[in-house]
Image (cartoon, grey):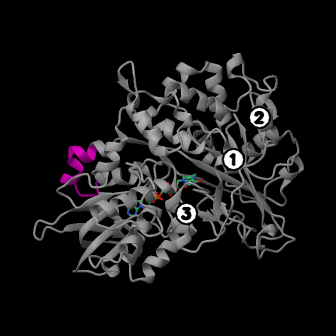
């Protein structure tokens, strides 16, 4: 790191939002930015943030995603970046009609949603015969008449922005509260439990929840194609990082932003970063500071912890406080189990997810090591995300995380004798593996399920994330905050981007939209050639 020199831009956060900002600034044709004057600081020893691709033991070619796992065909910035980075993509299959639903002790297949006799909910006739997503979309269409027919995110956002109910703007209502006006309580519980997530249909800003839901769970799933990079989602920020460094950009790993303020002597930003490897703090002078961070990490900067200086005027500003407090971080939990063979194939389950009201909630079936390019074909090791969950079910697993001994795995012909059957830092308790195995047996109706040889998990509520994604709070005018947060305090050249304060929360696209808008508006960058001017970046 260059000391005693003023750098142009310090970017904090080595997630996809931070890396995109760094790469765009360093590669712009504008003479205003020199790549070597753009410095990125990442507190951990890994690039990628919430994009985190790992290999389960004994599976060197198959990728397990702890974080983001798929891209939608309509997400043009992430696809543009993927194209620029030359990443190869493959289909992310979303499963078939034979995938299972196991709710209220009854097992049926996704294709049976149309058969009211199989669905264990006491639904009124007008709610029968529909999937949970279709029922939810119908209810939303009653809340905002005609919204399901609108094709663009922008048109849906506008429709929600304009709507008032009893003279009160839609944003002042909770999503659950209005859904329950349109659905029977059984219908709501069917949509909630069958939808697989615990928090999507709860009370967050209704004017944001509806367009958000429609962007993914459209009426016809064939309208959306999902893909994923062959090298894993983490390859996106990693390639951006290589490209950034390749043109002279500077990356400082294991450097945590501790505080910043305006220097009283020269007016530049005086930034204190903790170098975790050297075990000491350093001061960097910068003209601008980009915080490409989730809400929890920014809040930590605002706190007055004993080892941190008191909050600066930036964090005392009303505009900054109201922006930062406008979203809620939501838990997301991934729990993976690896087996010697894909036992789920005997039930004709090959991909996509099964859904249950047991704490597992969503079970995603993934591939077999030997089927990956370059892998040993005789290696049939395969893995599932036995639980991809949120809210109360994530709390259930947290209740067992530190209970009793760790699960050290079982021997496997493809894990070296002295190798580990867990991923260091992501070890699971034996109690978790036992409960997950019991629940998997119940969901699939196979009492003697094979035992896993390896397990791993990631709880995104852990520091420094505080949650896997964010939702807009009731009452917040998200369009106003999205615009303001890009530079929330005019006296400070401090800019915020990332998924948390975006119109596509929970998606890489959200992080990239906010970064692109920030760069165009406040750093004077033109739209890149590979991204259409017509593409909607959000407010
Ligand atoms: C389980 C899960 C599933 C998901 N599924 C999908 C999906 O299928 N498709 C999709 O598009 N998106 C998905 N997402 C969302 C996507 O992963 C995120 O939107 C995106 O990665 C967020 O990027 P970001 O740059 O905003 O923040 P982050 O990735 O959170 O990056 C922030 C970075 O800042 C660092 N940091 C924090 N504090 C400091 C500090 N003080 N100093 C220095 N560094 C700091 C962190 O270590 C981190 O590297 C999923 C997310 C999760 C958790």
Task: From the image, tell me which residue sits under label 1.
Answer: 222
Front tag of 1 and 2: 1
Find numbered disc 2 in the image and state the secondary structure of the residue it sits on: strand
Give the mark, 1 or 2, whose residue is nearer the N terminus: 2
Residue under the image location 26 percent in, 48 percent down: 320
Find numbered disc 3 in the image and state the secondary structure of the residue it sits on: helix
- How many discs mark residues in the rendered view? 3
Question: How far apart in space, not on screen, are marks 2 and 3 (Cα)?
Answer: 35 Å
Left or right for 235, reference 307: right
Task: From the image, tell me which residue sits under label 2.
Answer: 102
Badge 3 density bin: few <14, some 14–19, many ≥20, Cα 10 Å: many
Task: From the image, tell me which residue sits under label 3.
Answer: 79
Quarter occupied by residue 164: top left
| 404 and 64: which is toward the camera | 64
Badge 1 density bin: few <14, some 14–19, many ≥20, Cα 10 Å: few
Question: How far apart in space, not on screen, are marks 1 and 3 (Cα)?
Answer: 19 Å
Left or right for 258, reference 374: left
Establish if 377 lies above or below 341: below
Establish if 296 lies above or below 425: above
- Label pair 1/2, CB-CB below 8 angstroms: no
Ligand 1 closer than 8 Å to label 3 CB? no
Front tag of 2 and 3: 3
Residue under the image location 45 percent in, 38 percent down: 208
The spot of residue 249 in percent (x, y) is 38, 79
Quarter occupied by residue 511: bottom left
Q: Is residue 435 visible?
A: yes
Give the mark, 2 or 3, whose residue is nearer the N terminus: 3
Find numbered disc 1 in the image and state the secondary structure of the residue it sits on: helix
The spot of residue 207 in percent (x, y) is 43, 34
- Label pair 2/3, CB-CB below 8 angstroms: no
Q: Is residue 462 magenta?
A: no
| 363 and 173: which is toward the camera | 173
């Amino acid at each position: 790191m260059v000391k005693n020199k003023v750098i142009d831009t310090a970017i904090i956060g080595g997630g996809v939002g931070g890396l995109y900002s760094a790469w765009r600034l360093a590669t712009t044709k504008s003479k205003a930015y020199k790549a070597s004057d753009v410095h990125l600081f990442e507190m951990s020893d890994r690039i990628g943030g919430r994009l985190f691709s790992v290999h389960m033991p004994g599976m060197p070619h198959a990728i397990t995603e702890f974080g983001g796992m798929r891209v939608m065909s309509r997400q043009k910035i992430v696809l543009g970046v993927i194209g620029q980075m030359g990443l190869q993509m493959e289909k992310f299959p979303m499963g078939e009609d034979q995938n299972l639903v196991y709710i209220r002790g009854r097992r049926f297949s996704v294709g049976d949603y149309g058969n009211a006799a199989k669905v264990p909910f006491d639904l009124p006739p007008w709610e029968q015969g529909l999937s949970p997503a279709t029922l939810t979309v119908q209810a939303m269409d009653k809340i905002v008449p005609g919204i399901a027919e609108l094709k663009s995110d922008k048109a849906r956002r506008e429709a929600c922005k304009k709507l008032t109910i009893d003279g009160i703007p839609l944003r002042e209502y909770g999503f659950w509260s209005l859904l329950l006006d349109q659905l029977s309580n059984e219908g709501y519980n069917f949509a909630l439990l069958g939808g697989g997530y615990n928090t999507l249909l709860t009370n967050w800003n209704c004017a944001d929840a509806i367009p958000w839901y429609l962007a993914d769970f459209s009426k016809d799933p064939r309208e959306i194609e999902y893909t994923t990079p062959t090298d894993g989602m983490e390859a996106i920020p990693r390639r951006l990082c290589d490209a950034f460094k390749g043109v002279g950009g500077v990356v400082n790993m294991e450097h945590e932003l501790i505080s910043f303020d305006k220097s009283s002597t020269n007016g530049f930003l005086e930034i204190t970063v903790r170098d975790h490897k050297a075990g000491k703090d350093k001061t960097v002078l910068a003209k601008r500071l980009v915080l490409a961070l989730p809400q929890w990490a920014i809040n930590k900067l605002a706190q007055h912890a004993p080892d941190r200086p008191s909050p600066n005027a930036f964090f005392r500003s009303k505009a900054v406080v109201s922006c930062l407090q406008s979203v809620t971080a939501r838990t997301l939990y991934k729990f993976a189990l690896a087996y010697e063979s894909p036992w789920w194939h005997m039930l004709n389950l090959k991909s996509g997810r099964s859904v249950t009201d047991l704490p597992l909630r969503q079970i995603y079936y993934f591939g077999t090591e030997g089927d990956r390019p370059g892998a040993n074909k005789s290696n049939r090791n395969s893995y599932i995300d036995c639980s991809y969950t949120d809210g109360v079910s994530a709390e259930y697993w947290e209740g067992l995380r530190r209970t009793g001994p760790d699960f050290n795995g079982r021997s496997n012909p493809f894990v070296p004798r002295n190798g580990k059957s867990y991923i260091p830092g992501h070890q699971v308790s034996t109690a978790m593996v036992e409960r997950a195995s019991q629940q998997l047996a119940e969901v699939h109706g196979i009492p003697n399920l094979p035992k896993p040889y390896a397990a791993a998990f990631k709880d995104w509520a852990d520091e420094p994330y505080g949650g896997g994604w964010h939702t807009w709070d009731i009452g917040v005018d998200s369009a106003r905050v999205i615009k303001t947060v890009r530079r929330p305090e005019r006296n400070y050249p401090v800019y915020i981007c990332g998924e948390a304060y975006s119109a596509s929360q929970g998606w890489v696209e959200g992080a990239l939209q906010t970064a692109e808008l920030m760069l165009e508006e406040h750093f004077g960058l033109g739209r890149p050639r590979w991204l259409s001017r017509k593409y909607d970046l959000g407010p």
